[in-house]
Image (cartoon, coloured by chain):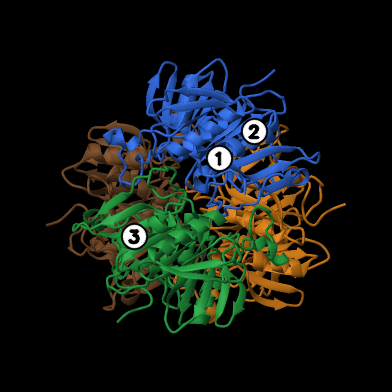
Chain colours: A brown, B orange, C green, D blue
Amino acid sequence: MSRPPLHDVAHLGYVELLTPEFDKSLWFFTDVLGLTVVSAEGNSAYLRTWDDYERHTLKLTGHATSGIARVAMRAESPEALERRVKAVEASGRGIGWKDGDPGIGPTYAFHDPDGHVMELYYETQWYADSRPAELAPALKNQAQAYPARGVSVRNLDHVNYLAVESAQCGDFMVDQLGARITEQIQLDTGRVSAVWTHFAQKSYDVVYTDDWTGTAGRLHHIAFRTDTREDILRAADIALEAGVFIETGPHKHAIQQTFFLYLYEPGGNRIELCNPVGRLIFAPDWKTITWTQAERAKGQAWGLKTIESFHTHGTPPVG
Amino acid sequence: MSRPPLHDVAHLGYVELLTPEFDKSLWFFTDVLGLTVVSAEGNSAYLRTWDDYERHTLKLTGHATSGIARVAMRAESPEALERRVKAVEASGRGIGWKDGDPGIGPTYAFHDPDGHVMELYYETQWYADSRPAELAPALKNQAQAYPARGVSVRNLDHVNYLAVESAQCGDFMVDQLGARITEQIQLDTGRVSAVWTHFAQKSYDVVYTDDWTGTAGRLHHIAFRTDTREDILRAADIALEAGVFIETGPHKHAIQQTFFLYLYEPGGNRIELCNPVGRLIFAPDWKTITWTQAERAKGQAWGLKTIESFHTHGTPPVG
Amino acid sequence: MSRPPLHDVAHLGYVELLTPEFDKSLWFFTDVLGLTVVSAEGNSAYLRTWDDYERHTLKLTGHATSGIARVAMRAESPEALERRVKAVEASGRGIGWKDGDPGIGPTYAFHDPDGHVMELYYETQWYADSRPAELAPALKNQAQAYPARGVSVRNLDHVNYLAVESAQCGDFMVDQLGARITEQIQLDTGRVSAVWTHFAQKSYDVVYTDDWTGTAGRLHHIAFRTDTREDILRAADIALEAGVFIETGPHKHAIQQTFFLYLYEPGGNRIELCNPVGRLIFAPDWKTITWTQAERAKGQAWGLKTIESFHTHGTPPVG
Amino acid sequence: MSRPPLHDVAHLGYVELLTPEFDKSLWFFTDVLGLTVVSAEGNSAYLRTWDDYERHTLKLTGHATSGIARVAMRAESPEALERRVKAVEASGRGIGWKDGDPGIGPTYAFHDPDGHVMELYYETQWYADSRPAELAPALKNQAQAYPARGVSVRNLDHVNYLAVESAQCGDFMVDQLGARITEQIQLDTGRVSAVWTHFAQKSYDVVYTDDWTGTAGRLHHIAFRTDTREDILRAADIALEAGVFIETGPHKHAIQQTFFLYLYEPGGNRIELCNPVGRLIFAPDWKTITWTQAERAKGQAWGLKTIESFHTHGTPPVG
């Protein structure tokens, strides 16, 4: 069977996010979401969620615009890294090897078909090996003490890109990175306009949605996972008190059935807080779920209409 | 690298549980836990949890004693099935091929080192393909309508065996089935007395704990996963009202950090209801967490002492 | 001090609801919401929520139209009943004494200024005194065993009437029944268009909202309380699976901060499921919170716009 | 009927707690529980929970020992205050009038039969009238912005005293303060050894439990209410990470059905975090629930044995 091997990419590593409002964005990620600053360097800060076993989860960088600079993914093994680099090189989308970020080993950079920068690496420093004593957790099977500050998000959950050709980008994830498509949207014209791809039991990791402006390289949102739906409800209260813009939610997506809340961080990037409520994909032969235009028109799971700004707000802004 | 390949076993398939109180056990699984009966045959009933994409999750069989008859696991692919069967055969623990259960293709049976019967298969019938219309879900990415009856558990989560030599059984899972050990208990004598093994991002699937009676082939418990911790709390109320024995909990395990409730079903088998609260293992090179005797003596995460009957009650009962 | 005495009305007793789809409405209240049928009589059924200490919570009556027939309230004492009856009689809105419903003693009927029928009583039969053995709870401080069926709502929470003159109705609740107004909406014209009145620590029990059709005697909704917000989220799933129309929610009201879900029962009446998340009014001199038109325009607490049908759907329908 | 009038006491106002570890106790209440410091004076700090409409909820005072200095209660009206003061004076337990605490008007002090100091007042300053701008809530019907720090408890919920004669103290609450007894424990000897008294719909406010040492004036615990049970579970994690001693829980009480967690604050006082999960007492003629010795021996609602230290740890310590 020619199906590409799942599992060569283990998981999302970290994301570099750009913001024209660095100080305010830093406040958002530390005080509102509860991330911890690991280090700072130039106009960037490295931050982490409390359950990330690696050193950092988010690199926040001051920039002229908002948007996403790159997404790094950890390979399952050195051999898997080698396999994926070869596949990417063969596709002609490779950029090349470089030194990794702090705590990260040799890193291979490349573009997806929409021009988003992605990176692959295997070597990584475990946070527990350099963790300050005061952040040590009470339970030794945990990366860091639970912060109990703001939303206290647990992990980076997924990245949702905008792309000129979502279907092509999905195919790239499948063919070059060994991902699989769990769900997708197909318009009445036959065009696949959004794809949800995953690497393992988590039901999605990298998502592409068609960019209505036809502009390449943009971001729809990045998402952080909370432990419970109650955390999402509380997050809405926290956002309300903090004056953070709530775009839509809390509600439950029909697609993937994720419980969600969408915020704009002060730099303008859309941030989803999500809780999958126990949903995992166990079937190794999962059959892609295809949602029609009519089904999408019904809105979210419990009937909330999909908010109009989902189709007008991306970062960086255009026009 | 000689590390055995993870991911050849995709997930737990189903469990055959034995009960000397068939009618009462059936009531427990349908009315208290909320499973759905798929079919009956002889002195057995096939039942399913609502989020199982396969046909059944549990085969309940009337028998002279309680205990676990077998556990079936689905392979990741036909090739993975072949690889694992070869590895098991090489270990001398194979039993052989047989026709599968209803809805299941060719099945290879074998013993673990403690004599528990295990089975591997790849071909399986998706429940959605034979589902009665009245059990169709509102959302097409779901296997069955949410039952809203009793606890309404979502999935089979894990099996926790008793074994004469837990460490040896753990090694078998690693060497023959490609599992990995995420956490373990090591006594002051150096003996590893319990191992938690997993197949993918779920942090454990098959667990072994030393049997204090030195009897082979017994069960500590099987566990069903709920969506939320609130479901566990509500389950405690439901068990209380139904007169089902609550052994311990709700509380949070230190090991694996699972939120739990332990019940005895009327046939005497221990049933755990569990919620992992978002914990997944992402690191492909996860370092086994070893808990010492002193650490275990502290009890569960929030201080509840491990209940004495955890070390005296297994099924079938002995002596 | 001339302020009318709070506490003469202890709490809402029961509601008689009318439905043109009796069988379907009965299915909704028993299977979807989890109420228990106590008795049936003519074209009516008496139902109860599991935490009601009295005999019944809801009388459901087959009728040509939907709507609310009457709301009964229990007085704090025989003396309080006498005081309130006198006050109502003095207002000229009394109807008179009659035999009460099954399990209810002498009952005084009257109209509010909008013509809704209300009743006051003191004598009542405790459910525990006639409860079937199989519905006995495990804990003796509870009225009935938790049903674990559908949403399993706990109590009737409040009634929200439509009225031609909400402010006048609110004054009637205050002056004749000793209620107080915790929150209200005041339009830019100065008109008070909605009032939330309460009898004790619960922050509202009887609500009036202006009827856009200018028709007297109609209902906006009745509400049932769940134990947790998770119950509300689960209720949305249950409604989705059952094909029950979800009008709006789950979300959090700005006014009163209640977490809510609005459904239409098959007879057309709007049913709210609500959870106040711990909010009680302790201050004996609570100062009425007045929301302006501009504040209301912001929508619900987390930004959800108030659904248009809140201002177009009432029961019975008109025109 | 000679039953004393309920409702003359509106609610618990604030508590003065003593601690031999002032700095650590202050850390506990602000960083772990999430209270806000309002002011400091001498060796005392005034703190508040975010949903308290009055100025402060807790006065924390450095002292040679732990224990409770006094509990203040707000009367329903000036007339109710007068009535209760007369009743207390008539009992011979009055101390007399004094100036109130900051923000509190004239205050009448007295002893309960066990010598605990209690106070009654009516005049009070609303927190909203002096609230710093940065603590203003987003929703105007709320006293203070939700802090999102540590447990973020919502309100003081109840005080549980130790007493030489609990039943006598309960009678005092009923006869002098107009409380009622919702539940009690009666030993096989006929002795009532614990009483739960309440003022309104909340099912208990002041509790007495027999002191096993026969020492007067001691404290079993004070309790703070959270919004949800999930907050209690999260609180257990927070306590674990902070190194705060967890005595027992989370679990559900059989008596009153409250979901609970018991901690020791660094000064040694026992602090309960509790969530009543929607339980209110509506019946104006509620019949006191009496638990027998045998029923109590069953432990808590879901079977957890009542922890031994409940009968050995009180503050201040004796002997």
* Outermost bottom residue: C64
Pick whichever, C188 or D1, lies toward us.
D1
- Look at mark 3 in the image and give the residue it sits on: A207
**What chain letter is assigned to the residue under label 3?**
A
Pick whichever, D287 or D2, lies toward us.
D2
> Percent from the top left, x then y, of residue B204?
58, 51
The amino acid beneath tag 3 is: Val
The amino acid beneath tag 2 is: Cys
Mark 3 lies on a secondary structure that is strand
**What chain letter is assigned to the residue under label 2?**
D
Q: Tell me the CA gap for discs 2 and 1.
A: 13 Å
Residue count near mark 1 (Cα–Cα under 10 Å), binned few <14, some 14–19, many ≥20: some
Mark 1 in CB contact with mark 3 (< 8 angstroms): no
The amino acid beneath tag 1 is: Asp
Q: Image check: C242 left or right of A183?
A: right
Residue count near mark 3 (Cα–Cα under 10 Å), binned few <14, some 14–19, many ≥20: many
Q: Image check: C216 left or right of D109?
A: left
> Percent from the top left, x then y, of residue C29?
52, 72
Give the position of the C terminus of chain D as an image quadrant. top right
**What chain letter is assigned to the residue under label 1?**
D
**Labels 2 and 3 share a subunit:** no
Q: Tell me the CA gap for discs 1 and 3.
A: 52 Å
Q: Which mark is residue D169?
A: 2
